[in-house]
Amino acid sequence: MMNTGSRHNRLIPMALLFVLAIIVFSCAPIVGMNTIPLSAVLHPASGGMESNIFWKIRIPRVCISFLAGAGLAVSGMAFQAMFRNPLATPFTLGVASGASLGAAIYVRLGLVFSVLGISGISIASFAGAILSILLVYGLTRARRGFSTATMLLAGVAISFFFSSVILFTQYMSDFSQSFRILRWLMGGLEVVGFESVLNMAPFVISGSAIIIYMTYELNLLMTGEEIAISRGVSVWRTKKILFFATSLMVGGVVSICGPIGFVGMMVPHICRLLIGADHRYLTPATLLFGGAFLTLCDMLARTLIAPAEIPVGIITALLGGPFFIWLLLGKTSSKRGII
């Protein structure tokens, strides 16, 4: 009876999150500087300006914001379980810094190219993310193992080093190049057409599928590596698979959208408050709410100071800062209550 009641308590919030995701996904393309009339939505063959805006700009943008939000949120959830640290984010291991460095070098060199419809800056950014992943993995393996502490320290070291190289690159750039680098570092979801959606989707879908498949292992990792080993989990293999799956997913997202912070930290925490810590339920809830959350943030970014637009990374940072303080004060007050 208790298990049934507990399952119902989880399924109700999940159903509400599912409804929220559908509502946000349906309404976000219509809302903007100009509201799209229903006739332009129902008759795309009419070829009018409003119809083109809806189908070629807003629908792809909502799709990519939902994919990016879901990918960043579920990556943050996986890292928090793997490191057993509620403050871990998708960018903890330096993937975002590597991707940003690749983009900064691309802009500084003045390169302009595309391959199979993929922009050169996305290719350079993803190459930087891959470099960061390989360096963190190599440094971790150099200590003869796959220690979580070593991986975390290697990621922080690589992140700080790449950030310093980005600053040097930006300093050596001219005004226009420096502005382009700074704008890219703020994160954005400005897309036209479905090419970027199709480029990002394989990373998010495959990475999310691996995390969903490993929810049992994530639950045991949260209890401690010793208990996970005693239950038959290959901790070294599990951490390696999660490291590559989540890092490649984050690299794919950041290479197209830029580094959008705080989504991977806030969303898993909110979903834990609603669903609980069981990753069998937490993972789909995080995917749904992560996509809806970033789509809502992008909708705010498009409308708050229209016709101008705020980079969506600024919106998430403005929300993430107070959330971080609330999390810190909440933990402090709970500890005092226990004492």
Image (cartoon, rainbow, N blue to C red):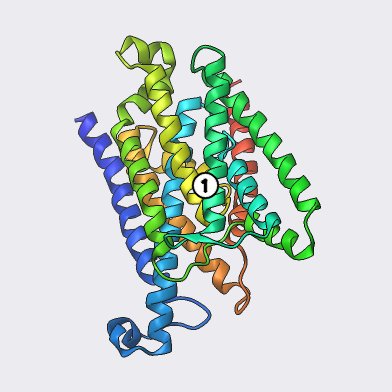
Q: Which residue is nearer to you in this view: 76 or 131? A: 131
Report x, y in % for residue 104.
Answer: 66, 52
Q: Which residue is mark 1?
A: 126
Residue 207 occupies quadrant: top left
59 vs 171, left or right, is left
* Residue drawn at point x = 71 percent, y = 46 percent: 166
Quadrant of res 96? top right
Residue in the foreground of this view, choosing between 103 and 189: 103
At label 1, which amino acid type do we have? Phe
Q: Position of residue 324 (x, y in %)?
A: 62, 42
Q: Position of residue 2 (x, y in %)?
A: 23, 30
**Camera sees residue 170:** yes
Q: Quadrant of the C terminus?
A: top right
| Residue displayed at 43% across by 80% down | 53
x and y percentages locating residue 192 in the rendered image = 46, 71
Helix, strand, or loop for circle 1? helix
Q: Residue at x 59, y 57 (%)?
A: 187
